[in-house]
Amino acid sequence: MKKKKKKMRKKKMNVYENVCQQFNKAADLMHLDPDVRNILSKTTNEIVVNFPVRMDDGKIDMFTGYRVQHNSVLGPYKGGLRYHPLVDINEVRALATWMTWKSAIVNIPYGGAKGGIQFDPTKCSFGEIQRITRRFTFALGCNIGPEYDIPAPDVNTNAQIMAWILDTYLSTQPPHERQRSTHVVTGKPVEAGGSLGRDKATGQGVVFCIEQWAKDTKFKLKGATYTVQGFGNVGSWAAYLMKRHGSKLLAVEDVSGAIRNQNGIDADDLIAYVQKTKGVKNYPKAEPISHLDLFKTKADIFIPAALENQITAETVRFLRVKVVAEGANGPTDIDGDVSLWRRNIDVIPDILCNAGGVVVSYFEWLQNKRSEFWDLGEVDTKLHRKMIDAYQRVRDTAKASKTDWRTAAYIVALRRLETVYRERGIFP
Ligand code: NAD
């Protein structure tokens, strides 16, 4: 038991260490201003709240929640909320820092933040999750706000949870503030002020990147094969949209297990199955495979859309794909990155590839502020433009700086932040 705990701690440390190493590599290569480097190497605020919740059995449990605000020089803090037993301060620091880079790459006026609560929502009832969410929102108080720090969904959180946060936040505001504060969260249900296209936005952004990669490399998506790790919001939408290109889904893994069918798995059918059963396990039209078999499945494209540190030196050995399109945040560790580079496997890095979510969150925020409601075509067209612009900036920077795409993505972000710091200076 002790050994297991130690191993887990090591894994969690590594996520933030990954961010620091990625940052240092890019900062060295681009000769980032030392003062800006110093500022960006630290988070701005780290809020840890312990709060009580009455559970269904009548007893009170204590929960620990986090909100880390990395940087706000480009605009209000922005980033998701994760409910997971492995959430800890290092993971949230890492995710918050990645959000700063992401907003800078896609050129939206946001800073970076992230939050989470350390618990397993699959072990809680609907009512318990609602009470945990509302107490967490209350505990955060004015550490979030529509013009200050705006949460959104992430792993194990969704539109329903955003609606509870919205309702709790508004209930604690003076009456005259309530009508103009709906943009305190994004990823809300459409009826409660959400945007059309936000649910699919991250998966859609991943597929826009894959389309551009295919165009650049003269690769045909029709008939192409792919595998997906994680079949939640990001993974299932990516699969749904890849099907519309005529690509064939060969294997999928989620927390319940992994499955494969060399003749192809119908994404729509698997989505309907997972909605009922909550996992891909026992899907009748595919065979069960092991975790490593997912990596060993030969395909053109691999879409990791689950958790961090999945692509390591160990697992890259088995990968037989042309490109990794990172839907998840931080799916590749430092050694995994080196191995992908050595093996000549293309990587569309997370801070570019999964930025579609924050882009449409920004569109939702704008619609709320302006009391507008855009149609899906408008959202998709604007998202496409943002993603392709960012993709091209990263691609051109990789070429000009003779570096890998992850480092290039960092350089794009850091240049923008450096310019703003240079223009604004540091108070006093
Ligand atoms: P989700 O909760 O909807 O889905 C997570 C999926 O990962 C589930 O299918 C789950 O079963 C699977 N999973 C969990 N642990 C696993 C394990 N050990 N092995 C295999 N599969 C596992 O979450 P999501 O919103 O789809 O987020 C997935 C990833 O995408 C995360 O890294 C998240 O930070 C990132 N992301 C999400 C968004 C968004 O808009 N939701 C935006 C940007 C990035």
Image (spheres, rainbow, N blue to C red):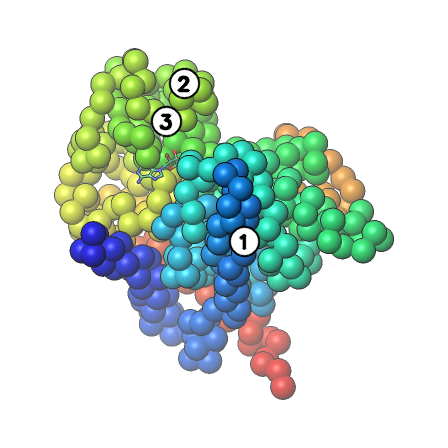
Q: Secondary structure at mark 2?
A: helix
First in sequence, mark 1 or 3: give its number.
Answer: 1
First in sequence, mark 2 or 3: give its number.
Answer: 2
Q: To which residue does mark 3 refer? A: 279
The circle drawn on residue 210 is none
Amino acid at pointer 2: Tyr
Q: Secondary structure at mark 3?
A: loop
State the residue at coordinates (18%, 35%): 292
Amino acid at pointer 3: Gly
Q: Position of residue 351 (x, y in %)?
A: 43, 51
- Mark yes or no: residue 297 visible: yes
Distance from the alpha carbon under mark 1 to that under mark 3: 30 Å
State the residue at coordinates (26%, 28%): 258
Q: Position of residue 361 (x, y in %)?
A: 60, 45
State the residue at coordinates (37%, 17%): 266
Q: Is residue 68 left or right of residue 292?
A: right
Q: Does 76 sit above or below residue 214?
A: below
Ligand 1, by image quadrant, is top left
Q: Position of residue 423 (x, y in %)?
A: 60, 75
The circle drawn on residue 52 is 1
Specify few, some or many for label 3: CA neighbours under 10 Å numbering under 14, 14-19, or 20 or more: many
Front in this rendered view, residue 3 or 275: 3
Front in this rendered view, residue 249 or 42: 42
Q: Does 411 sit above or below residue 193?
A: below
Q: Is the residue marked 3 within 8 Å of ligand 1, measured from its CB?
A: yes
Distance from the alpha carbon under mark 2 to that under mark 1: 36 Å
Q: Secondary structure at mark 1?
A: strand
Amino acid at pointer 1: Pro
